[in-house]
Amino acid sequence: MEFKFDIDKIVNHLQKYAENLEDFYQWSVSLKSLEKLSNLGIISKEKALELNDLKPYDKEIQLKSIVQPKLLDFYENDFSAFVKLSMWIVRDWGGVRAAKQEDTIQTIKDVIENEKTPFKRVASYSKVCAFMFPEKYLIYDSRVAYSLNWILLSQDAGEIYFPIPEGRNSKMSAFDMRVLIRLKHKENYQVNSVSEIDKRFILNRDKSLFIPQNIAYKKLSELVKEISKKLWKSAQAEKLYFTEMLLFSIADSFVIEEIVNQISLK
């Protein structure tokens, strides 16, 4: 199933923010809990202290370079260690405290071995996939989908959008992207009779506007790969996490500003 997106419009919109990504990216997690996995030999106390002194962007890039080879090695040679490190990424680094280990690990295996990419738990399992295979996968969370959907919507860069995982950000909830998308395409929800507005009304009408959930992660990764090729230079173009970090960083700040300045109801 192919979907058309205007890559140039997306890239042009992101370029004004891309040059300041190092300053915009503010996700910084304490590495003390990673130190507790000392028996896995992932990171020393000295290295953790060194990373914690860096600004979030630099810390994140170095952390990815440290964790990726460990994940790949553990997956092949020490699966119990792989489970521990993966759940650290999901729960401690990613903040998804309620993630269930058995379900999360099984889904990661399904992605790696069978290329199955369900939407359920995507904000959890995609974190590990993105650490392992940064040239192929990125983190699919509410902020990334929110920013990308806004660009598609505001720049007329596509006629279909990505389902958004549930999030807890109050600013993004206040300006619900799904509502904005539906209002932009309100003709899709017009009816001849109120009797047409049944229990499945929104679900059925949404099908023409949102990518099916079972292929959304794959399509998001493919699109961001195309964006990255044009947005970044040198090695940055190969790693999807640079574009992901950018989309993540602008979601509840610059995107909110753009929405407030551009959207009006008359």
Image (cartoon, helix red, strand yellow):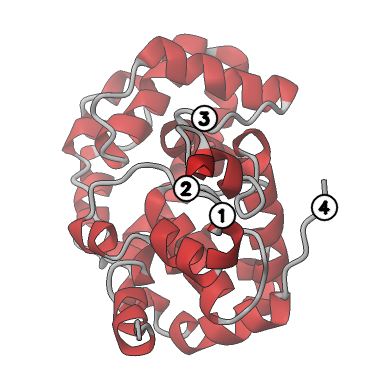
Q: Mark 4 = which residue?
A: 2
Where disc 1 sits, the SS reads: loop
On the image, the x and y values in percent for residue 162 come to 56, 53
Q: How many angstroms separate mark 2 from mark 4 (CA)? A: 34 Å
Looking at the rendered image, the disc whose residue lies closer to the viewer, 3 or 1, is 1
- Crowd band around label 4 with a 10 angstrom C-alpha radius: few (<14), some (14–19), many (20+): few
Query: Which element carries disc 4, helix, strand or loop?
Result: loop
Left or right of 265 in this view: 32: left
Q: At 71% from the left edge and 28% from the top edge, which residue is drawn?
A: 115
Q: Is residue 164 left or right of residue 159?
A: left
Counting residues from the start of the chain, the first of labels 3 and 2 encountered is 3
> Where does label 1 land, which residue?
191
Mark 3 or mark 1: name the one nearer the start of the chain.
Answer: 3
According to the picture, the residue beneath numbered tag 2 turns out to be 194
- Marks 3 and 2: which is nearer the front? 2
Quick one: label 2, few (<14), some, or many (20+) residues within 10 Å?
Answer: few
Give the image location of residue 29, x and y in percent.
22, 48
The amino acid marked with disc number 2 is Val
Q: Secondary structure at mark 3?
A: helix
Q: Foreground residue, 79 or 172? A: 172
Q: Earlier in the sequence, mark 1 or mark 4?
A: 4
Q: Are marks 2 and 4 in contact (CB under 8 Å)?
A: no
Residue topped by disc 3: 71
Find out whether the residues at labels 3 and 1 contact each other: C-beta distance under 8 Å: no
Can residue 24 be seen here? The reply is yes
Q: Residue 130, how many percent across, how many down?
A: 54, 43
Give the left or right position of residue 58, taking residue 246 as reference: left
